[in-house]
Image (tube, rainbow, N blue to C red):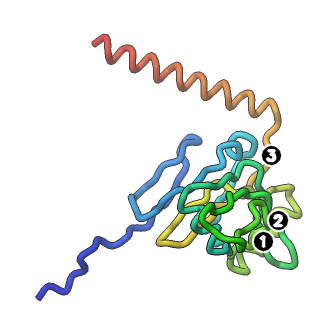
Amino acid sequence: MDLSPSRPQAIELHWRYVDGKEEMTESANIKIICKNRKARFNFEVEDTFEAGIVLMGSEVKSLRAGKANLSDSYAKFRKGEVFLIDAHISPYEQSNRMNHEPLRERKLLLHKSEIKKLTGKVTERGYSLVPLKLYFKKGKVKVQLGLARGKKTFDKREAIKKKDQRRELERLVKYRQRGS
């Protein structure tokens, strides 16, 4: 009789950033719901944190359908707790009258030590807490928060130039490979 599990074990997924691009080091049982693409353009992200989120049942079902938007959202501190503000989760269509409000404030679940560390940085140094991703990890909804500082307009222009140069270089390499 074989006692080994019939299903493979879920592997942790770790994100790391190399030259502004995101890389996944290992595959896992993680489903990305939505990303905040504007955040990386408008902010310079210095550190990331993973937080749980308190949701209603209809919100979870709506997230499983992929109906969420983080574009103008941010996190705020209130009475020693962290809340996600302006994150839009569309109402679940099959729900009854007990459906949720799309833009309600949602409590984030972090350890006290993380909250103290973030509070100190946000109040003293002018950082902001910006949600970068919303995803399922082992059946639970998680938010990846970024401790970020706003970029100036010339920094944004410089980022656009670098991106265009990188695209042009990739095109040239692709063209040369086809020609050979």
79 vs 168, left or right, is right
Q: Earlier in the sequence, mark 1 or mark 3?
A: 1
* Picture residue at 70% right of the left edge, 69% below the top: 99
**SS of the residue at dot 3?**
strand
Q: Which residue is mark 1?
A: 82
Q: Nearer the viewer, mark 2 or mark 3?
A: 2
Q: Can you say whether 73 is above or below 165 in the image?
A: below
Task: Locate residue 130, reporting x and y percent.
Answer: 74, 56
Mark identifier at residue 21:
none
| Count of numbered tags | 3
**SS of the residue at dot 1?**
strand
Q: Which residue is mark 2?
A: 76
Q: Amino acid at mark 1?
A: Val
Question: Do the residues bearing badges 1 and 2 touch, measured as CB atoms within 8 Å?
Answer: yes
Q: Which residue is mark 3?
A: 150
Task: Locate residue 101, reporting x and y percent.
Answer: 76, 65
Q: Amino acid at mark 3?
A: Gly
- Nearest the camera: 167 or 61? 61
